[in-house]
Image (cartoon, rainbow, N blue to C red):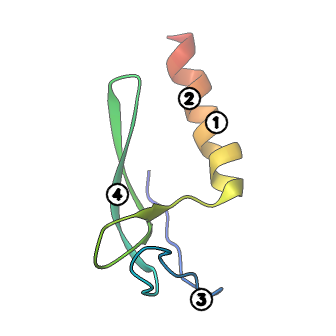
Amino acid sequence: MKLEFENKEGLMCSKCRLLLEPGKAHITYLKSTFPVELLTCPKCGEVYVPEDLALGKMQEVEKNLEDK
């Protein structure tokens, strides 16, 4: 899954107080791992998953995996 995000809202890591940057993340669900590009903290690696992605595309992928 290739997604491209920019930090237009100026989102910051609550732990490190740094601006989130586009970066590579791996999402795992039901023993399946998917590489994606999301906003991440450049220091601690914390990943930001926007609500629309979590309730849209990711929910669709979860449903497809559960149906298999």
In the displayed structure, 32 sits above or below 5; it is above
In the displayed structure, 41 sits above or below 65; it is below
**What is the spatial separation of the Cα atoms under label 4 and label 1, in whole angstroms?**
17 Å
- Which label sits in the foreground, 1 or 3? 3
Local SS, label 2: helix
**Mark 1 crowdedness (10 Å alpha carbons): few <14, some 14-19, many ≥20:** few
Which three-letter amino acid code belongs to the residue tagged 3? Gly
**Mark 3 crowdedness (10 Å alpha carbons): few <14, some 14-19, many ≥20:** few
- Which label sits in the foreground, 4 or 3? 3
Pinpoint residue 35: horizontal percent, then vertical percent.
34, 50
- Which label sits in the foreground, 2 or 3? 3
**Mark 4 crowdedness (10 Å alpha carbons): few <14, some 14-19, many ≥20:** some
Local SS, label 3: loop
**Mark 2 crowdedness (10 Å alpha carbons): few <14, some 14-19, many ≥20:** few
**What is the spatial separation of the Cα atoms under label 2 and label 3, in whole angstroms?**
29 Å
The residue identified by callout 4 is: 25
Which residue is painted at 43% across and 73% down in the image? 15
Residue contact between numbered discs 1 and 2, judged by CB atoms under 8 Å: yes
Which residue is painted at 63% across and 48% down in the image? 54
- Could you tell which of marks 4 and 1 lies nearer the N-terminus? 4
Number of numbered tags placed on the structure image: 4
The residue identified by callout 1 is: 59
**What is the spatial separation of the Cα atoms under label 4 and label 2, in whole angstroms?**
17 Å
- Could you tell which of marks 1 and 3 lies nearer the N-terminus? 3
- Residue 62 is marked as 2
- Could you tell which of marks 4 and 2 lies nearer the N-terminus? 4
- Could you tell which of marks 2 and 3 lies nearer the N-terminus? 3
- Residue 10 is marked as 3
Pinpoint residue 14: horizontal percent, then vertical percent.
50, 75
**What is the spatial separation of the Cα atoms under label 1 and label 2, in whole angstroms?**
5 Å
